[in-house]
Amino acid sequence: QVQLVESGGGLVQAGGSLRVSCTASGGTFSSYTMGWFRQAPGKEREFVAGLSRFGIYYTDSVKGRITISRDNAKNTQYMQMNRLEPEDTAVYYCAATLTSIKGDKWPRALMEYWGKGTLVTVSS
């Protein structure tokens, strides 16, 4: 059983930057495909970015503004968000799976483990 804990959310002005982290425990972190999803108020949870053995993938709306990475030695993945927009306001969730995923649209159903989320609020 893998536990995921996000941190680093907060309030930022439009155009600003924020880095969120996700620390895993209870499993072999390097074996997992890791992803970030977000859920804005009144909307469904959507894929943002993911890192698998096939590569790194981003949804179109964040390409060029968000960069994800992982440090297997620290059991942690990161998401650096730049040029944030009010539309980026959401709860951001870390997710993990043993399935190798390819492409820029990751189904929520493929992710086996979820964190509780961290809120990112972008003010205009």
Image: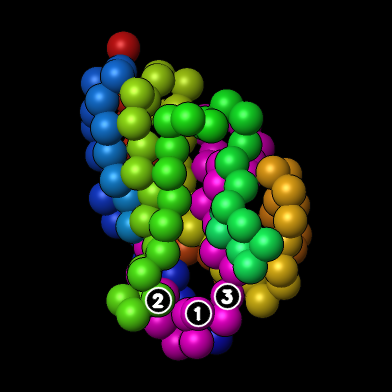
| Residue range corresponding to the magenta coloring | 22-49
Mark 1 residue type = Ser
Is residue 49 shown to the viewer in this render?
yes
The foreground one among 58 and 55 is 55
Magenta span contains residue 14: no
x%, y% of residue 61? 57, 27
Is residue 117 shown to the viewer in this render?
no
The residue that disc 2 covers is 72
Q: Secondary structure at mark 3?
A: loop
User: Which of the two labelled residues, at mark 2 and mark 1, occupies the earlier sequence position?
Assistant: 1
Work out how far the residue at label 3 is from the one at label 1, CA to CA, in angstroms.
Answer: 6 Å
Task: Find out whether the residues at labels 3 and 1 contact each other: C-beta distance under 8 Å.
Answer: yes
Work out how far the residue at label 2 is from the one at label 3, CA to CA, in angstroms.
Answer: 10 Å
Please give the name of the residue rendered at 49% of the width and 58% of the height, measured from the top-left corner.
Answer: 94
Residue 96: which quarter of the image? bottom right
In what quadrant of the picture does the N terminus appear?
bottom right
Please give the name of the residue rendered at 35% of the width and 24% of the height, measured from the top-left corner.
Answer: 83
In what quadrant of the picture does the C terminus appear?
top left
Mark 2 residue type = Asn
Mark 3 residue type = Tyr
Decide: is 73 above or below 84.
Answer: below
x%, y% of residue 18? 28, 39
x%, y% of residue 6? 36, 59
Task: Find out whether the residues at labels 2 and 1 contact each other: C-beta distance under 8 Å.
Answer: yes
Model colouring:
rainbow
Magenta span contains residue 34: yes
The foreground one among 55 and 105 is 55
The residue that disc 1 covers is 30
Q: Label 1 crowding class (10 Å Cα cut-off): few <14, some 14-19, many 20+?
A: some
Please give the name of the residue rendered at 40% of the width and 19% of the height, measured from the top-left corner.
Answer: 86
The residue that disc 3 covers is 32
